[in-house]
Amino acid sequence: MSEVAHARPRVVYVAGFGRSGSTLLERLLGELPGWTHVGELVDLARSVAVKQERCGCGKLFTDCPVWSAVGELAFGGWDVPEVARLAELRLLVARQRQLPRLLRHHRHPEADPAFSALLEEYQDGYGRIYRAVAEVTGSDVVVDASKGPAHGVALAGAASYDLAMLNLVRDPRAVAYSWSRRTLARPQAGGAPDEMWRISPARSAAQWSGLQAEIELVRTRGWLRSSRLRYEDLTREPAAALSGALAGLGIDLPASAMTHVEGLTADLGTSHGLSGNPGRYDVGRVQLRPDTRWQAGLPARDRRLVTAICLPLLLAYGYPVLPEDHPHTSKKEHPMSDAVAETPAHRSDLPLVSVVVPTRGRPELLRLTLASIVAQDYAGPMEVVVVHDKEPADPTLAGLGRERREVRSVTNDGTPGLAGARNTGLRLTSGEVVASCDDDDLWHPEKIGRQVDRLLADPHLLAVGTGIRLLMSQDRIVDWPGKEELVSHRRLLGSRVKELHSSTLAMRRVAFDKAGEYDEGLPNGYGEDYDWLLRATRVGRVGVVTEPLADIRKDVPSWFRDRADNTIAALEYLLDKHQDFTTHRRGHARVLGQIAYAHATAGRRGEAVRTAGRALRRYPGAPQAWLAVAGATTGADPSRVLKLARAIGRGVS
């Protein structure tokens, strides 16, 4: 067995009942400097490693480089008897039924030497994991959101790590509402769909009361540092709530540690959490809103029953008895609540939104994309069609959907390429609004709702884009807000307009009657979205929600990157098709410059210089043409110049 040499890490153990917001809490804590989060670590040995479930980064457990390194450091790998032994030991020492025995053991450890030996073995196994996580991630504090109080007590008091308990509590009526709802499949499942279960409000209330009573019993013992945090406070005043709760554990946070939280928004990096709700897959800026749908959605009979069962602790935790006394009622919910990002309250007056996602060879990124689409806080119905291009459909993707968020997987029956795939999805859907998203990009939760509001407010709009965030690398993000709320045809001739990226567009279906479908005659399908927009802006209005609401990955390869001949053929096709480029000197020079640059990357220096000359005669300031000239005449590698341009959020489009 490998030895782990990292110093004794501090562990913050999140205890509480399911669907109470622990995923949100651990994600916020995991962004603190020197902190990392591991999700529900209790599931590692009993299900994650066995079933090859997905890490928060989207990869299968053993494919994740972080968890692979942790396993190698802790045990020499995950497929070893020590890991299976942890699952056995949990049944012997860490189940809820063992809590009385655990409490007795902490008072009189000498009274039960056999139990003490098992407990020491259990703590040693988890100690190896905690210390390996700390060493691999370079962290001093590990956040474990396993939630069960008995499991937390079983791990407390070890010599190899320092564990404290943070009790996250949520209004039990909100919890009961969440548990009673039809929920989505667990997206971490690596194989067949694995749907989360439901329980009745009465059972939820009884279990909530029992578990919280156990946590209070543990807290009153005094030998385990503990603190309490309400979900409602966390989503209304996140910075203050986190600081106060951690101060109760003896952890003082400087103001500089909370830079990822600004008001009611938070910036989240890639997660490596295990189990938990789909919020584990969210990356970027998220809105923090309390989920109060239970006040309208939980039937009055169930509300009264849950209130009666939970009344003593309800009052002790400061919750009002009557829902109308509950402050800050909101119709929007936080998408990362452990109430499992459920479908918002239905509104029959909102149109069906059909989302078309073309894909090829990106199964892990695709699942992250779908999670961000399904998690939209839009109150109307949505359907998602994944169109596989040059690969078989994946029926297991249906398990990522939920009520009024159906996900279907089909194959492209049109011309191979993006244009054919988009048209296939268009023909298989029926929504009044059609949205497109690439298989490696991510939507912010409010994106579709904001776009539909804009379309409903302006019946003359054919399509709406949004501002974007460019994910240049793991630690570099460039905000690109929209510069104008309406984009004219002439503006689009002069600039590609990043805010009208294919992953931002929400279009009326009638727009395709007016502008036509995507052009499957485009060579290699390159620029199919730009071509469609040029046609759409001739026959109607195209707008932008200027706030960045989509994350566009620039840190993964594009199918068209480094394929110069594809680019040249498609751009020349566009110039022949859209003759009005000749009426816009700067726009014409831009496209000619792109063609010249593509020639330069392909090593055709003479053709690059000749085409760049044409561009510069049209507009001497065309940057793409100058890049081509530099590459062709000096021998400088144009791809390096492009990489530098992309690093500052530019590019040559």
Image: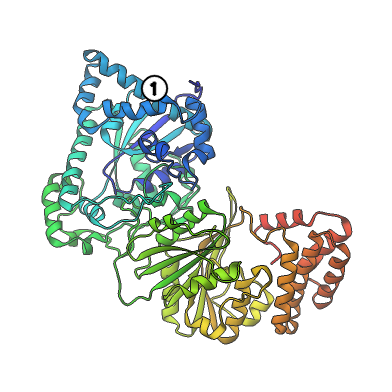
Q: Is residue 526 left or right of residue 621?
A: left
Residue 82 shows in this picture: yes
Instruction: Decide which of 387, 108 is in the foreground and name it.
Output: 387
- Residue at horizontal 31 percent and vertical 21 percent from the top: 119
Instruction: Choose top left, top right, bottom left or bottom right for residue 471.
Output: bottom right
Is residue 123 depicted above or below 61 in this figure? above
Name the residue: 78% across, 57% down. Answer: 638
Residue name at image x 86 percent, y 60 percent: 632
Q: Amino acid at mark 1?
A: Asp
Q: Where does the image place residue 327, in percent across and percent down from the top left?
A: 24, 59
Counting from the top left corner in percent of width and height, residue 332 is at: 33, 63
Whole-percent x, y for residue 521 in the image: 65, 75
- Name the secondary structure under disc 1: helix
Where is residue 578, by image quadrant?
bottom right
Q: Quadrant of the C terminus?
A: bottom right
Q: Quadrant of residue 150?
A: top left
**Residue beneath disc 1:** 124
Q: What colour scheme does the image use?
A: rainbow
Q: Is residue 302 left or right of residue 543?
A: left
Asked whether residue 500 is in view, the answer is no
Eyeballing the image, is 544 above or below 97? below
Residue 514 placed where, x, y %?
54, 86
Total tally of numbered discs in the picture: 1
